[in-house]
Image (cartoon, coloured by chain):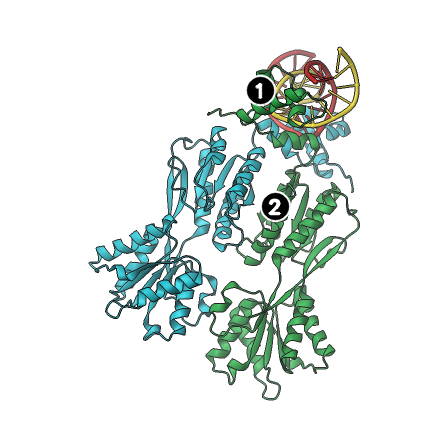
Chain colours: A green, B cyan, C red, D yellow
Amino acid sequence: MKQNTPITLKFLAEKLKMSVSTVSKALNNYPTINEYTKKRVQEMAKELHFTPNKSAINLKERKSRIIGVILPNLLDHFFTRSIYGVEQFATENGYNIIISQTHDDLEKEIQSANRLLKSRVDGLIVAISKQTQNFSHFDQFENMGTPVVYYTRNPSFNLNCHKVLGNTFQGCYEATQFLIDRGHQKIAYLGGPKMISFTHDRFNGYINALKDNDVSFSSDLVAYTDFDRENTITAIQSLFKSSENTPTALVAFKEPILFDAIKYLKSVEYPNFDKIECIGFGNTSLISYLDFPPIASVEENPESVGENAMRLLLQLINDDIEIQNYQKVMVDCKLVVH
Amino acid sequence: MKQNTPITLKFLAEKLKMSVSTVSKALNNYPTINEYTKKRVQEMAKELHFTPNKSAINLKERKSRIIGVILPNLLDHFFTRSIYGVEQFATENGYNIIISQTHDDLEKEIQSANRLLKSRVDGLIVAISKQTQNFSHFDQFENMGTPVVYYTRNPSFNLNCHKVLGNTFQGCYEATQFLIDRGHQKIAYLGGPKMISFTHDRFNGYINALKDNDVSFSSDLVAYTDFDRENTITAIQSLFKSSENTPTALVAFKEPILFDAIKYLKSVEYPNFDKIECIGFGNTSLISYLDFPPIASVEENPESVGENAMRLLLQLINDDIEIQNYQKVMVDCKLVVH
DNA sequence: TTGTAAGCGTTATCAA
DNA sequence: TTGATAACGCTTACAA
């Protein structure tokens, strides 16, 4: 059964003593082809394990049925979960995905974009790098009529683009509301890096929930950190130093940050430490093994963000939505109580 | 700058009033082309953002510069870490990867294989589904001269194939050795599903370490479970029930299983629970937040497994290794002490 | 009902 | 030094 060179239509045609076009039509079930001929062709194709050459079809049809996905990192569970949704939906609709990681490096992002441009992907889904402020390497795609959807990370500097983002405002609002409903009046907000727009969206969710419930706000209850443990400890110290305004609950930007915070409070044997109720963004699978787990998690549904990005992209590819008619899709978070 | 249709060589040629072949050669830096002509062509190409059409080149060169990756699930951190290595190495060598997940379903695996066959991928990297015992959908590739490398999961029923696997024997040997060196004489082994070959490879590592150190073996110290929590608890009960042969240390198949075990022992307030030293396969990132963390982890280096699979595949594609000269690569584990 | 031929965008051979 | 032409594998008017 070794053949070592793919079967082509031409080869089939010679074997069957027919023309290439008859074979092609038979395989594609053209109504004008005789039933008996069809059967003969299809049987022979099956027997010889004929598979049409995608490159040839792509060339002919001027499309690739490939979607490019550019994202920072495949080690971050958030992104891989988002890919899950993209891949799933793409496959269901006959598309393959090519994934390219940028390591949050602009230069690599540009290279990825150029590679995918050559591959003539039919569409692009992008989680931009932290450094990305200029979008010309992505604009090339739109200039050739290839739609681009930005997802998970908000391209704040790009005003006219399609985006699919987690509704981080709503997620933080619900977390805060949940804590208020449980009787908390002193709820701290531990934000992430200030350059990230989500940090502020979440803060707005927090502050709006306070306002809507007539809970007074104090700037003592707000601090910011990044993903560095030392900075998180400093932030936590500032939140919990005051004697009058001590928080009884905490909403944190991301669970790893929250875990660092909890670990610290525990290590210094903070009074009533075990009474403090915490919520972070993430919903890490190992939460049930923690000794002092958060009371709830804000599940960001990255799979759904990915799926929605792919759905929008498909609508753009199929011209169900005008490419210039820029869309913004928000995917709601879900509060998961542990 | 909108053009809405990709620039082609023909278009460039017309603009420059030259032939298509001259333009092509100029862009590919043929020595026979006049320097001035080259410059003119290359400048025009840059100005119009010309990018060669990959499909056309693929058709011409009869290859795609695409590697297919088939794996069970993109939610499993082990696999996504392995992809990290594949993607990294592929990109460095000018290849793109297409990922397809099977959800451990044979039917989906066959569909994935067929799709990638049509795409004329230059090579295939596969982590087989749990159901896979017949390999004809992969043999098609080898029959067309496209190399296939199996990785992470051992295709036990496929005798003649290329594989890249984690050296789980060595990992378990080292874990056991480590515990012996710390003075343990009663070390329990909690294995995974018996159908998985790794379960037995690990057991062999365990038993060999015992033997090499003249530590006596008792079947009371061995139990098996799967990923179901109840079964893990049953297994743990059987390991810790005996009064004479009580383990002082534990080697577990996978960390999630180990965490369930620890959680259970803690919940029943097992005597001297905090003295029991545990090691599991995995090295989960959140270990430092656990209250009773394992003393060490067996890091399986999935990135390295992925990278080695890609490296081997590349050698096969480039004919550095004969496709019939079946290779088996083992990637060592690393014991990480916490 | 089937076959001929052109074309998709490249590269490569040969001729000019 | 450049250009005409065929070829890669497939689809599709159009002709037979």
Label 2, label 1: how many angstroms apart (C-alpha)?
37 Å
Q: Which residue is mark 1?
A: A11
- Quadrant for the N terminus of chain B in the image: top right
Of all residues, the one furthest to the left in this rendering is B214
**Can residue B95 be spotted in the picture?**
no
A314 w.r.t. A170: above or below: above
Residue A15 coordinates in the image, percent (x, y): 57, 16
B297 w.r.t. A235: above or below: above
Q: Which residue is mark 2?
A: A112
Q: Nearer the viewer, residue A261 or A89?
A: A89
Q: Quadrant of residue B4?
A: top right
Q: Which residue lies at the image location 64% right of the left edge and 42% below the top edge?
A: A95
Q: Which residue lies at the image location 44% right of the left edge and 37% below the top edge?
A: B134
Q: Which residue lies at the image location 55% right of the left edge and 76% below the top edge?
A: A234
Q: Nearer the viewer, residue A4 or B245?
A: B245
Q: Which label's residue is closer to the chain start, 2 or 1?
A: 1
Q: Which residue lies at the image location 57% right of the left edge and 24% below the top edge?
A: A43
- Quadrant for the C terminus of chain B in the image: bottom left
The label nearer to you, 2 versus 1, is 1
- The answer to whether A27 appears left or right of B95 in the picture is right
Three-letter amino acid code of the residue under disc 1: Phe
Q: What is the chain identity of the residue bearing mark 2?
A: A
Q: What is the chain identity of the residue bearing mark 1?
A: A
Three-letter amino acid code of the residue under disc 2: Ser
Residue A325 coordinates in the image, percent (x, y): 79, 50
Pointer 2 and pointer 1 on the same chain: yes
Residue A126 coordinates in the image, percent (x, y): 65, 51
Q: Quadrant of residue A58?
A: top right
Look at the numbered disc 1 and give the secondary structure of its residue.
helix
- The answer to whether B256 appears left or right of B211 in the picture is right
**Label 2 Cα neighbours within 10 Å, binned few <14 / some 14-19 / many ≥20:** many
